[in-house]
Image (cartoon, rainbow, N blue to C red):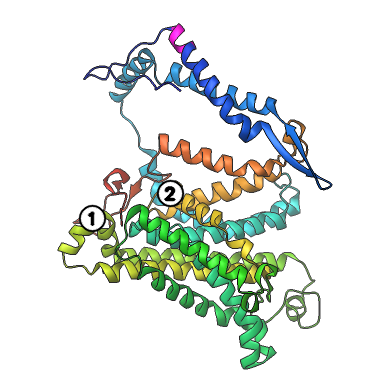
Amino acid sequence: MSAAPKSGSAKGDAKVLSMQEIVKDLLITAFITFPILVPIVAIRTQLDQGVLTWHTRYWLALSLAAAVVAGRALLHIFVWNPRAAASLDVSASAKSTAPRTNWGEKLGPYVAPGLLAFGILLPILAHIGHAIGIEIPNFGELRLIDLAGYILIYIMLGWGLNVVVGLAGLLDLGYVAFYAVGAYSYALLSTVYFPRWFGSGVIPFAFYITFPVAGLLAALWGVILGFPVLRLRGDYLAIVTLAFGEIIRLVLINWFSFTSGPQGINVPKLTFFGLKFRDEPGGFADFFHIPFDRIHSYIFLYYMIFVLALATYFITKKLRRLPIGRAWEALREDEIACRSLGINTTTTKLTAFATGAMFGGFAGSFFAARQGFVSPESFVYIESALILAIVVLGGLGSQIGIVFSATFIMGSFEIFREMDFLKAVLPAGTEPIQFRMIAVGLAMVLMMLFRPRGFVTKREPTVYLKESKAISGDLVAEGHG
């Protein structure tokens, strides 16, 4: 594939390509793209009744190749054409003379309170909409509340990983390991050890007892991971953390006598301080003398994770303003300068790993209590990639940005489940949800092109002189710890 037109002078004037050169470039693009897609997309093997059969989908490879060629043609027309760029520059200079209103700065102070109010009122609004017949298509009252709670789990995980990646600048690709530690801590303590030590009467209260223990155990594993990687930076640190996440997953699969292996563990679900959400004597509805309804458990689970996520938000925000938070940011900006200032980088890194892991453990224990079942399949590498994508798309160090990115990514997964109309054009047996990761990858590419600093590019300074002013994300280092 030929290279894009490059700047030919100090002024940045690009070489003008003729129509014949553009057509030649597009043909070369097609001849390179289609052979690459043939073994990946066009050729498909399928096991039919014990016999391996060969299926071809050349039309799909041709369609994707045509899409690539069309995209490159649009780049030639709108991006690499110097005349279009010059016209854009003229229009931009004309607009620069007019006064501009920065709506982002004006609306910024109201975003967090607005999200808080929306989070509190969401179940109420969903119930009112269901009562009067106004609902999102294919999203009933129960499903909407359940999806909101599911998104809040990933918001909490994103805020936890933001301590490690966004504040301390330590690239962690194995964060799902702490998520798994929290989930299995609750599973094993509530089903094996607590009933053995305290009797079966403790089971309804197991979550409230094991929740802090799960966070502490995850923090301990964060310190265990931190010690071997104290001298590692950048890509080497990412590889080691990725290996740590895979080691935890393989241990969960193969240590059958301890974790039940791939079979997983059935765990007691979260109760209202001992009251089960069941239609039985002594249950939640019977205790409060109200009719039994499944929505009670959904609303309680939603508000529980909402409170936990809110506590994560305020704790991490407070930590950022403390000396340890400023040490994390100093480590992110420049580790050598951080050492020269007398900051102990060993304890700084360990506290970042332990703090981020603790919040991951909290989220994992709630996930286990919410699902009532845990298995190693819930803690694969793709979960770590999704959480990291949430942090990057939201903006490193930005807590509000993580809310938007988590809602976009996890919400889009549910939207793909409802795209049944795509089955008419997709091959037989192909589900639209299988393309959800393509959407996430495309969002990452577009974000890196147009907003490389994430959804929220402004940062509030940790300390300031006289007046607090938001600073651009361009002034924040990427972090190479």
Mark seen at residue 247 = none
Quarter of the rendering containing residue 128: bottom right
Quarter of the rendering containing residue 430: top right
Amino acid found under the numbered disc labelled 1: Asp
Mark 2 to mark 1 CA distance (whole Å): 20 Å
Specify few, some or many for label 1: CA neighbours under 10 Å numbering under 14, 14-19, or 20 or more: some
Q: Nearer the viewer, residue 8 or 112?
A: 8
Q: Secondary structure at mark 2?
A: helix
Residue 11 within the magenta-colored segment of the rendering: no
| Residue at the front extreme, as displayed | 51
Q: Nearer the viewer, residue 289 or 230?
A: 230
Q: Position of residue 90 (x, y in %)?
A: 32, 16
Q: Which span of residues is magenta-colored?
A: 19-23
Mark seen at residue 392 = 2
Q: Secondary structure at mark 1?
A: loop
Mark seen at residue 334 = 1
Q: Position of residue 234 (x, y in %)?
A: 34, 53
Q: Nearer the viewer, residue 367 or 31?
A: 31
